[in-house]
Amino acid sequence: MEWVFFLYKYVCYNKNYLYKGGKDMSKPDIICKEFWNNERCADLFNTVLFKGKQIIKPSDLMDIDTDASSTIELPKSIESLKKARDIFKKSKLGVDFLILGIENQDEINYSMPMRIMLYDVLCYYNQVRDISSNNKKNNIKYENKAEFLSGMKKEDKINPIITLVIYYGEKPWDGATSLKEMMTPLDPDIMALVPDYKMNMLEIRNAKNYKFSNPNLELIFDISDELLKGNIDTIRNKYQTDNLSNDEVRFIGYITKSKNFMNSRKGNVTMCEALQKWEDQTFERGKAEGEAEGKAEGEAKAKTEMVINLLDILDDKTLSIKSGLPLEQIQKLRKENTD
């Protein structure tokens, strides 16, 4: 298992955690776990990976420990490897189990296929370790030397793992989606013998291509994607009357990093209400930044700089109302800064 340790050393500390420096580091994770309940999780996997076939049933899903840490015994040392999965569930399939994992990604990472492979391998390793431990605990008799050295009976089996990466980034994913894509292409006869590891991925920008059983899943992905792109008018025109539950609003905040959305405590709200809060928060943040930078040059210049910084986020009418500048001036600024 030495290779597991060296792979781990290379990638495990490169994962981007959201909201570093915040007082409540666990809150985004809690929002994510609350959103991906059994119904939504089953719908996600059935739609994206099983092409609509109802393979995963919500009633058969149960949460399992997200801690995938393990202790690897090397010839000269014992190494502890720490890794927590974002979402981890298992699904009953008859008398057997399928393990499902979700990894959230908001930035492109060119080592992602290897990282996912490593996360899955650690989980497989833990299963083998647990089988060996249980066999020893229950005084299972091994039939031959191979079973004794393995710590497993020939008929002992591990449960398969399927991991789905959800990419929330604004830019299209241009990284590898399999281990082989990360490799230098050698002679085809050589590459044919190199094992591959495929990474399953959903880009929220492409979520509209799927037909989810829960229509709000597509709605949430689309709203989040449009928010990240700054297409406020598109959201207002398409979704202003749609009702969203509290956990749905919070999850949109998780994706878009909007603290105002994440702190939502109201019950069901329309997208129009939620959007107004988002605009107010965005404007106030921009206003504070603009005023801090423009004190020396006067309030007028500070307002102008603030508006320029928000051109890609808010529409002209909203900028005019929030800043107090004439609509004609806003339109002029947009023309000067987009040509």
Image (spheres, rainbow, N blue to C red):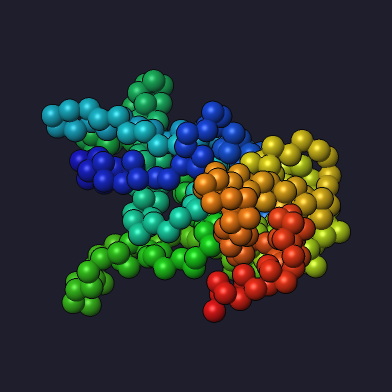
Quadrant (top left, top right, bottom left, bottom right) of the N terminus = top left
Residue 89, located in which quarter of the rendered image?
top right
**What residue sits 22% from the left and 27% below the top?**
78
Question: Relative to the observer, which residue lies in front, 280 or 291?
Answer: 291
**What residue sits 58% from the left and 56% below the top?**
301
Across and down, in percent, residue 317 comes to: 76, 65
**What residue sits 22% from the left and 77% below the top?**
188
Judge whether 118 appears above or below 314 on screen: above
134 left or right of 275 in image: left
Across and down, in percent, residue 9 comes to: 26, 41
Q: How many marks?
A: 0
170 left or right of 271 in image: left
113 left or right of 147 in image: right
Question: Relative to the observer, which residue lies in front, 64 or 222?
Answer: 222
Q: Is residue 217 visible?
A: no
Q: Is residue 335 visible?
A: yes
